[in-house]
Amino acid sequence: MERDASQGLDPTPRLHHIGYVVPSMKGGIRRFEDAGGQLVVGPTDDPALGVVCALIRLPEGVDVELVAPLVGADSPVTARLQRGGGLDHLCFWVDDLDAALSREVHNDALPLVPPTYAVTFDSTIAFVQRRSGLVVELMGAKR
């Protein structure tokens, strides 16, 4: 990958994880562990986002973030669960979150969640929906 020498940043986003919505964190973890996955980050409540998240690494090395509604919270994944849950988003690690978000919006992506602190990864994230319908999470530097 080439780096932007003027800023010292790599402008190319890198896949960090695949987001997968589950109705129950315990059941979701069990399902992915039964398929050979290994729990990398245990369930973490994120009250600001209204979700509980965990990270599972599949045998192939792909990380899957399990996302479930936080009990008692107004959760943004409730609507996704009403449609059956499952595959929800792709998350890309970016060196410059603001620049990556600007590029997405410039390319007609609809901002869904502005830059927000995410407890699970101790990082700032933002969500957009591309014209194709794909929901993309952008993850920036750790706090």
Image (spheres, rainbow, N blue to C red):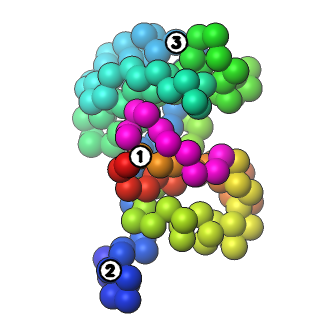
| Spatial separation of the CA atoms under disc 1 and disc 3 | 24 Å
Badge 3 or badge 2: first in the primary sequence: 2
Quarter occupied by the N terminus: bottom left
Please tell me which residue lies in front, 134 or 11: 11
Q: Amino acid at mark 2?
A: Gly
Q: Amino acid at mark 1?
A: Ser
Magenta region: which residues?
113-122
Q: Quadrant of residue 13?
A: bottom left
Q: Residues within 10 Å of mark 2 (few under 14, many from 20)?
A: few
Badge 2 or badge 1: first in the primary sequence: 2
| Spatial separation of the CA atoms under disc 3 and disc 2 | 42 Å
In the rendered image of this protein, does residue 102 appear above or below residue 6? above
Query: Measured from the top left, where is residue 122 in percent x and y?
Result: 38, 40
Q: What residue is disc 2 on?
A: 8
Q: What residue is disc 3 on?
A: 24
Q: What residue is disc 1 on?
A: 123
Query: Measured from the top left, where is residue 106 in percent x and y?
Result: 69, 73
